[in-house]
Image (cartoon, grey):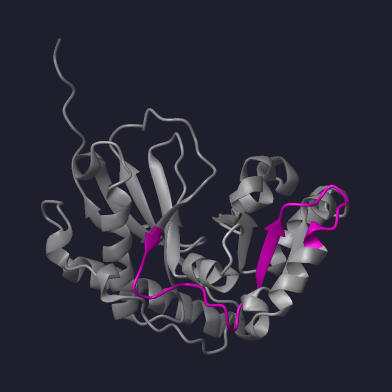
């Protein structure tokens, strides 16, 4: 993931301005300082560990909600378009989970179709549900699979059955498979569209984590992704802006740097 990748921006409609953030006291300068501090922290950490720290660090925007969403957990993520994609179909390892045919040959059929696309559509490995159930049955096999790829895509028809097949490692590492529609003829377009977004996974808690950047990004790129992801995510949060208690930026191993915080609502007297 350390090589230079083409991250040309999608349509300008994904870009947002600071004025689009409807949070009183939101300060773009505070966001800029937090991004710069986190980039500096990751850079210094990489210098100390040298070759032992080759992978890029993922930057997460953490939303703290005032009230827990009264909605069931959904494993189908909500796509959030961002101006600077975290993934590309050229240069990163992408794994595709596909629906098997009755004879267990779904994976082979998918490989044949991908082979007709330029660079296999960016997909490095295809795994059918039968092989996923047998070859990757053990916890260690699931853990190694999770670690081996940057992004996991899945035929949207098998998404409900995947949590049991892939195990907890994918959810702990926030690498849940992103659904794509393989019933459409243009697989390359579906894969590219999936790579152009970051994702909101709806849960039942008051904390939401969304990937918004990589340590190879510039300060401006991370800032622009934060704005775009925040404005898009709020549309899928109950009570929208009024339910945001705080916004933070972090890596998996860093402290959470505040981008915005507000005092909790006062309890109502009955």
Q: Give the x, y percent position of residue 41.
A: 43, 74
Magenta span:
80-107
Residue 85 appears left or right of 48 = left
- Picture quarter containing residue 239? top left
Residue lying at 33% horizontally and 69% vertically, measured from the top left? 225
Q: Give the x, y percent position of residue 62.
A: 38, 53
Q: Quadrant of the N terminus?
A: bottom right
Q: Tell me the chief SS of the magenta region.
A: loop
Q: Quadrant of the C terminus?
A: top left
> Relative to residue 225, is residue 22 depicted above or below?
above
Nearest the camera: 266 or 130? 130
Residue lying at 36% horizontally and 80% vertically, measured from the top left? 9
User: From where the camera sits, is residue 144 visible?
Assistant: no
Nearest the camera: 71 or 171? 71
Residue lying at 11% horizontally and 55% vertically, measured from the top left? 25
- Picture quarter containing residue 218? bottom left
Residue 246 shown in magenta: no
Residue 95 shown in magenta: yes
Q: Give the x, y percent position of residue 3.
A: 57, 88
Nearest the camera: 90 or 181? 181
């Amino acid at each position: 993931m350390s090589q230079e990748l083409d991250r040309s921006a999608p349509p300008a409609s994904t870009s947002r301005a600071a004025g689009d953030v409807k949070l009183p006291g939101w300060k773009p300068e505070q966001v800029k300082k937090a991004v710069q501090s986190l980039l500096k922290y990751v850079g210094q950490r990489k210098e100390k560990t040298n070759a032992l720290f080759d992978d890029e660090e993922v930057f997460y925007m953490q939303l703290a909600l005032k009230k827990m969403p009264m909605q069931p957990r959904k494993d189908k993520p909500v796509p959030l378009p961002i101006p600077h994609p975290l993934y590309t179909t050229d240069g990163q390892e992408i794994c595709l989970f596909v629906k098997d045919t009755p004879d267990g040959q779904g994976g082979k059929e998918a490989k044949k179709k991908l082979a007709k696309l330029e660079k296999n559509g960016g997909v490095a490995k295809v795994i059918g549900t039968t092989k996923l159930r047998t070859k990757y049955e053990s916890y260690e096999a699931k853990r190694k699979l999770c670690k081996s790829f940057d992004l996991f895509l899945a035929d949207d028809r098998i998404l409900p059955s995947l949590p049991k097949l892939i195990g907890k490692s994918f959810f702990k590492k926030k690498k849940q498979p992103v659904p794509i529609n393989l019933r459409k003829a243009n697989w390359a377009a579906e894969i590219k569209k999936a790579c152009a977004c970051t994702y909101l996974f709806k849960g039942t808690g008051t904390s939401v984590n969304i990937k918004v950047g990589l340590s190879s990004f510039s300060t401006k790129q991370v800032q622009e992704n934060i704005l775009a992801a925040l404005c898009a995510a709020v549309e899928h949060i109950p009570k929208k802006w009024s339910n945001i208690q705080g916004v933070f930026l972090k890596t998996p191993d860093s402290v959470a740097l505040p981008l915005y915080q507000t005092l909790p609502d006062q309890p109502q007297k009955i």
